[in-house]
Image (spheres, helix red, strand yellow):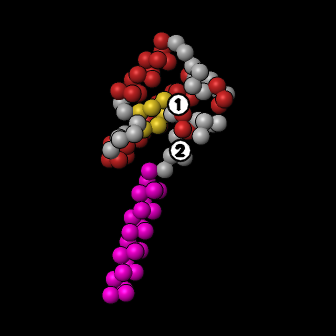
């Protein structure tokens, strides 16, 4: 019985650890997933998100403290297209100084 309890605890801890590892946010710069996006969809479309992240970094301001201040028709079109694809551009929780 004790062995079973220990194995159940190890299994639960390992599962939580793998989920935390798979869903971490440290590789995002400007484009993140919208809340509620299924995990399978995130895994399948991660290369698309990474490419759009590079586009947003190349198009936007270079200074991190100015991120989120971009304006213009093209920038708003990119923001709307990302929202259509269940992504968020410049999520305030991940911006420097906005925690």
Where disc 1 sits, the SS reads loop
Position of residue 90 relative to residue 27, above or below, is above
Mark 1, residue position: 90
Where disc 2 sits, the SS reads loop
Q: Earlier in the sequence, mark 1 or mark 2?
A: 2
The C terminus sits in image quarter: top right
User: In front: 38, or 9?
Assistant: 9
Q: In the image, what residue occupies the spot 32% across and 47% down? A: 40
Query: Seen in the image, is 81 located left or right of residue 94?
Result: left
Residue interval drawn in magenta: 1-23
Prevailing SS of the magenta stretch = helix
Q: In the image, what residue occupies the spot 60% across and 27% down? A: 67
Query: Seen in the image, is 8 located left or right of residue 32?
Result: left
Residue 94 image-quadrant placement: top right
User: In front: 46, or 37?
Assistant: 37
User: In front: 95, or 75?
Assistant: 95
Q: Horizontal and vertical percent for residue 80? A: 40, 22
Position of residue 81 relative to residue 53, above or below, is above
Discs 1/2, front: 1
Q: Horizontal and vertical percent for residue 88? A: 45, 32
Mark 2, residue position: 27
The label number, if any, that marks residue 35 in the structure image: none
Total residue callouts: 2
Q: In the image, what residue occupies the spot 42% across and 67% down? A: 14
Q: Horizontal and vertical percent for residue 1? A: 32, 87
């Amino acid at each position: 019985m004790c062995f079973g309890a220990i194995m159940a605890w190890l299994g639960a801890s390992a599962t939580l650890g793998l989920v935390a590892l798979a869903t971490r946010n440290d590789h995002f710069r400007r484009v993140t997933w919208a809340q509620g996006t299924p995990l399978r969809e995130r895994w399948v479309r991660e290369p698309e998100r990474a490419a759009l992240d590079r586009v947003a970094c190349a198009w936007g301001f270079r200074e991190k403290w100015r991120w989120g201040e971009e304006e213009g028709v093209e920038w708003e079109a990119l923001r709307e297209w990302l929202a259509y694809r269940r992504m968020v551009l410049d999520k305030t929780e991940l911006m420097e100084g906005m925690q």
